[in-house]
Amino acid sequence: MATYPSQSSAAPEIHRAAANASTIEIVAVRGLGILAMNDSLLWSVASRNRPRVSALLLDPNGEAARRRASEVGESWRVFKSGVELSVSRLEELSAYTDVHVYFYDMLPTWRVLSLDDVQFVSVFGENHEGHTSRMYKIAESSHGALHRGFRRFTRELRNQAVRIM
């Protein structure tokens, strides 16, 4: 396991892991900084290398989105439009690769970026975004309880979420 002060500090390692990834799976709120903008962390890799992409995003019409918007000091309408923009951009990405998008309605705690068998995990706090919190790189191993736990969390969240794309 490696630890980074923030997503920007982990970016070189994330890019290395993403370079050959066949699958990118994210659990995020909006996903704009990870995958949904031209200059986001993984847009160029996803559009160029064409991995299978799965994005679990916060349902912009759910109660959890209203609570999260309040936590980060945004109006719900602005917050909602950010999620909707992300979905629109992921629709554009689907011209290059297989993209699945799901909405979940649960106050976000974990932000998970899985690149094949490597995970980069951070936490959403009550007053800060996931990309500003400490990030942990967790690789699969025979004693990888955290890795297995985050896989299980992601799988269960996806099973309870609504697929929109």
Image (cartoon, rainbow, N blue to C red):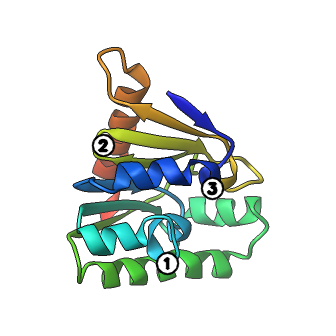
C-alpha distance separating marks 1 and 2? 25 Å
Q: Is residue 165 visible?
A: no
Q: According to the image, label 2 marks what residue?
A: 155
Q: Which of 77 and 124 lies nearest the eye of the viewer?
A: 124
Residue 19 rendering spot, x and y as whole percentages: 33, 57
The C terminus sits in image quarter: bottom left
Q: Give the class, few, some or many, for how many residues have Cα within 10 Å of label 2's Cα (few <14, many ≥20).
A: few
Q: Is residue 71 visible?
A: yes
Mark 3 lies on a secondary structure that is helix
Mark 1 vs mark 2, foreground winner is: 1
Q: According to the image, label 1 marks what residue?
A: 37
Please say if the residues under marks 1 and 2 sit with CB atoms less than 8 Å apart.
no
Q: Identify the mark nearer the N-term, 1 or 3.
A: 3
Residue 146 rendering spot, x and y as whole percentages: 43, 25
* Numbered-mark total: 3
C-alpha distance separating marks 1 and 3? 16 Å
Q: According to the image, label 3 marks what residue?
A: 8
The amino acid type, in three-letter code, at marker 2 is Arg
Residue displayed at 38% across by 29% down: 147
88 shown above or below 137: below
Q: Answer left or right for 10 relative to 119.
A: right
Mark 2 lies on a secondary structure that is helix
